[in-house]
Image (cartoon, rainbow, N blue to C red):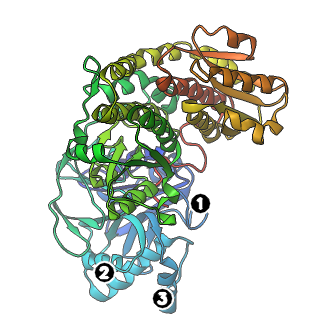
């Protein structure tokens, strides 16, 4: 959520910041702004709307300067207006800052400042923070000290970049809960919410930890805690290439990422899947291997699409490892005083590795003595750093807000994890080899589905004007129904619900008529006959049936209005393949409705506030 870019160096700062904010548009936002130090004063340009609107303001003003900060805001406190857009100036006119996160005690601070005559021009918690720092700076006349003292009284989460007019060679960035990265270039520094805004300038980065600040002063920098203790932060190298965050000829990032899945799935299993041995090598889990083997229960926690992959993981681990698995919404986990035992293993799944609710759930479990693992995409992310061990999915940057390639890679990693745990306990080599060999074939089977995308597009065009959709699946395919419905909701704004097919009779069947498209995941498995019965129930009520079926299934042709075939695979791996046509169906419907596919309304790629 939101995006921060700060720059201090030798380049014209306005273009650096605007280009950086473009790289962060995928995070979701509704307003944008910049503050630049020019000839000893601030020039602030901001507006509700898009980065391209901000760029017009900046270009018209012909801003010059080499120090500045910028922001894309996703509204929390106050509507998306020009006044509420960041950056925010304090009442003295000396402090300006941008902020991601939520200041929970801002009302208390605001009342305190108002009693001293401070007037506010916005409804944001961020302006309150700027004014609070300014009030302390008036007293101590030390920029860094003012920031540290103010943040010691602040409750909530924040990632901030701050400037002070009295010390124009200094920029301060601080993080608690909301991610910040410091890029170290050639006599230049760049602060950003994630590395995608930095790689154009440098690959040398420092990922700030919670309660850690970077103080850039002239040509030097230091990292320290907000309690003034210097830290020895590790300089890391960003691995992904700049072209990975470009569209590469596709109309949308989402479509590009759907088509990347043969490659990204291969990257997830490469070097890990030992199919000839019927085993899996997950080096990141080595330090906790014995704890995993001894676990009496596994808890998986996640949000959104990652929660759906967790549900698939529950089936896989229980089937192959015979360990009970519970899947929890991360947003609810810590608010009900969860019962955690020391021999529990809790796995957090997050594409960004920064999801606030998932991170909070992991910290709660860690405090109660569980072993915590992470399955994340972003190297250097907070979850990757705070867990006891984990596995990267290696999907590369995912820019489209609606997750696609991360989902299939997460399920691939969970399948390998199920084999990994199963082989330590009871899973035979023969059984493991069968699944491992099928996993190796998944990339080429994904490609087969993509090669037939035109048929899915035709179906999408027929149903683009539907007001509602119902997605039904059983067993391992129930989470796929949930994921298919979520994709459609996210990017087309059509109401859709995912259900276990057998639950249809307990309520949703009342919705079925000739105007309702019903998407069935009806692949060949041991409950195929049951799903066929559910299809018959929908047909009897004149519902329109779209079936995701296994190649070669001719029976389904007599029952469904439309059939989308996927290649045959082991039934435990069908969720990976079944997800692909549902992603394409949602994409083509969204495009036909002229929606903003990559940046759907009200959504953010990385939810870094609760």
| SS at circle 1 | loop
| SS at circle 3 | helix
Whole-percent x and y of residue 523? Answer: 59, 20
Q: CA distance from mark 3 to mark 2?
A: 16 Å
In the rendered image, the vertical position of residue 202 relative to residue 440, given as above or below: below
Q: Residue, x 36% and y 18% (percent of image)?
A: 440
**Which of these two is toward me, 447 or 472?**
472
**Horizontal placement of 493 versus 483: left or right?**
right
Whole-percent x and y of residue 114? Answer: 51, 87
Q: Residue, x 39% and y 52% (percent of image)?
A: 354
Please report whichever mark, 2 or 1, sits nearer to the chain's N-terminal start.
1
**Horizontal placement of 266 versus 464: left or right?**
left
Please report whichever mark, 3 or 2, sits nearer to the chain's N-terminal start.
3
Quadrant of the rendered structure where residue 581 is?
A: top right
What residue does disc 3 label? 112
Q: Is residue 468 visible?
A: yes
Q: Residue, x 68% and y 33% (percent of image)?
A: 501
Q: CA distance from mark 2 to mark 1?
A: 30 Å
What residue does disc 1 label? 80
What residue does disc 2 label? 149
Q: Residue, x 48% and y 54% (percent of image)?
A: 330
**Which of these two is toward me, 161 or 542?**
542
């Amino acid at each position: 959520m939101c995006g921060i870019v700060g720059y201090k160096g030798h380049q014209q700062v306005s273009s650096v910041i605007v280009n950086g904010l473009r790289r962060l548009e995928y995070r979701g936002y509704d307003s944008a702004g910049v503050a630049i130090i020019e000839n000893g004063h601030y020039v602030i340009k901001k507006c509700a709307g898009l980065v391209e609107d901000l760029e017009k303001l900046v270009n018209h003003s012909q801003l010059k300067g080499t120090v500045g900060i910028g922001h894309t805001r996703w509204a929390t406190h106050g509507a998306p207006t020009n006044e509420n857009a960041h950056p925010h100036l304090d009442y003295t006119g000396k402090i300006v800052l941008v902020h991601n996160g939520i200041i929970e005690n801002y009302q208390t601070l605001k009342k305190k400042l108002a009693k001293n005559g401070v007037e506010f021009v916005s409804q944001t918690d961020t302006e309150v923070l700027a004014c609070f720092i300014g009030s302390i700076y008036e007293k101590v006349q030390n920029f860094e000290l003012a920031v540290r003292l103010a943040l010691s009284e602040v409750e909530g989460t924040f990632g901030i970049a701050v400037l002070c007019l009295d010390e124009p060679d200094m920029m301060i960035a601080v993080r608690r809960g909301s991610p910040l990265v410091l890029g170290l270039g050639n006599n230049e520094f760049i602060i950003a919410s994630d590395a995608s805004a930095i790689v154009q300038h440098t690959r040398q980065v420092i990922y700030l930890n919670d309660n850690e600040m970077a103080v850039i002063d002239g040509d030097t920098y230091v990292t320290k805690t907000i309690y003034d203790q210097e830290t020895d932060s590790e300089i890391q190298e960003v691995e992904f290439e700049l072209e990975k965050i470009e569209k590469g000829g596709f109309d949308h990032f989402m479509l590009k990422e759907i088509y990347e899945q043969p490659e990204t799935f291969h990257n997830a299993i490469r070097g890990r899947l030992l199919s000839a041995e019927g085993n899996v090598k997950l080096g990141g889990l080595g330090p906790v291997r014995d704890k995993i083997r001894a676990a009496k229960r596994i808890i998986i926690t996640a949000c959104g699409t990652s929660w759906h992959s967790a549900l698939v993981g529950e089936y896989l681990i229980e089937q192959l490892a015979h360990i009970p698995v519970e899947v929890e919404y991360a947003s609810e986990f810590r608010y009900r005083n969860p019962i955690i035992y020391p021999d529990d293993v809790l796995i957090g799944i997050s594409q960004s590795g920064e999801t606030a609710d998932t991170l909070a759930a992991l910290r709660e479990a860690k405090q109660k003595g569980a072993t915590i693992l992470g399955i994340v995409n972003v190297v250097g992310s907070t979850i990757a750093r705070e867990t006891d061990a984990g596995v990267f999915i290696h999907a590369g940057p995912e820019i489209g807000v609606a997750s696609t390639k991360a989902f299939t890679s997460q399920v691939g990693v969970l399948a390998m994890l199920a084999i990994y745990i199963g082989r330590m306990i009871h899973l035979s080599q023969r059984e493991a080899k069968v699944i491992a060999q099928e996993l190796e074939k998944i990339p080429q089977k994904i490609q087969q589905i993509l090669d037939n995308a035109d048929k899915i597009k035709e179906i999408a065009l027929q149903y683009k004007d539907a007001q509602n959709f119902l997605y039904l699946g059983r067993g391992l395919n129930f989470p796929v129904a949930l994921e298919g419905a979520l994709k459609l909701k996210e990017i087309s704004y059509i109401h859709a619900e995912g259900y276990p097919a057998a639950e249809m009779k307990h309520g949703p069947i009342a919705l079925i008529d000739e105007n309702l498209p019903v998407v069935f995941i009806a692949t060949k498995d041991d409950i195929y006959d049951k799903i066929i019965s559910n299809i018959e129930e929908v047909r009897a009520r004149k519902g329109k049936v779209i079936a995701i079926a296994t190649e070669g299934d001719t029976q389904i042709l007599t029952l469904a209005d439309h059939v989308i075939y996927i290649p045959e695979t082991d039934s435990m791996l069908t969720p990976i393949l079944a997800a692909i046509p549902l992603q394409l169906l949602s994409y083509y419907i969204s495009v036909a409705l002229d929606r903003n596919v990559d940046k759907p309304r009200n959504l953010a790629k990385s939810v870094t506030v609760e």
